[in-house]
Amino acid sequence: MRVVLEALEDPHPLIGLATGRSTALLHERLVSSHRSGQTDLGRATWVMLDEYLDIPQSDPRSFRNQLCRDFDGIFDAGSTRLIGPDLGLHDPSAICADFRSATAGVAPHVQLLGIGRNGHVGFNEPGSKADSRTRVVTLSATTLADLDPAVWPGPDRPTRAVTRGVADIAEARTIVLLAFGTAKAEAVASVLTGPVTTACPASLLRDHPDLRVFVDEAAASLL
């Protein structure tokens, strides 16, 4: 958390957010720090990393709505301080184009990342290239299998998303990659000790000048 708190001391802090279990606890601690008066999250601009497509803007399962719940009282779905895909545009191409325009030249002070079992970051699935930019992607079988069936019953599971690309992520001043649990151990080992390859998109960030990886014992078990 210290990395984010330091970035928030900038006159115009810009923080890249990710969703998922890996980052949820960090979000909780940041909000707690804000409410205790230790820091002011309200000064920051927040940038989403990705979003499901083919769901309505009001869907509580959207990443935008998840982040608004995580940061309750800091920003809401309509806040100009939360830059992200606009599902209200409906058409995936229009959503992508708008998101690409909104984030053109946007380089967060800190970009928070989780990692998928297959090594994806954001929704940059295996095969994504180092020079990839914001685009519409088809979710991999592994990613779809990891969706909570209680949250996403089969028929309405999203199969597409819009994501910032590997090159967009790499423009952040500092990248914080979080991974917890044995399910992430193989991906963590691939990132840190395997070849740099599009088969594990997170490995493409290994040479970033300020990549910080935080894992628990279980996620580090194959190192």
Image (cartoon, rainbow, N blue to C red):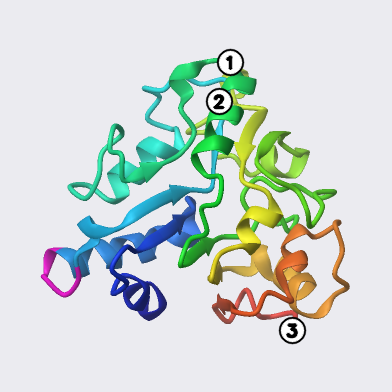
Report if residue 79 lies within the magenta region: no
Give the image quarter of residue 54.
Answer: top right
Q: What separation in Å lies between label 1 and label 3 (alpha carbons)? A: 43 Å
Residue at 29 percent of width and 32 percent of height: 78
In the image, the segment drawn in magenta is 35-39
Majority secondary structure in the magenta region: loop
Residue at the disc numbered 2: 95
Residue at 74 percent of width and 44 percent of height: 142
Question: Relative to 189, is 52 above or below?
Answer: above
Q: What separation in Å lies between label 3 and label 2 (alpha carbons)? A: 39 Å
User: Which three-letter amino acid code belongs to the residue tagged 3?
Assistant: Leu
Mark number, residue 223:
3
Residue 33 percent across, percent down from the top left: 20, 70
Residue 23 percent across, percent down from the top left: 45, 60
Q: Residues within 10 Å of mark 1 (few under 14, many from 20)?
A: few
> Which comes sooner in the sequence, label 1 or label 3?
1
Q: Secondary structure at mark 3?
A: loop
Residue at the disc numbered 1: 91
Name the foreground residue: 175 vs 138.
Answer: 175
Mark number, residue 3:
none
Name the foreground residue: 108 vs 212.
Answer: 108
Question: Relative to 173, is 63 above or below?
Answer: above
Q: Are the residues tagged 2 and 1 within 8 Å (C-beta)?
A: yes
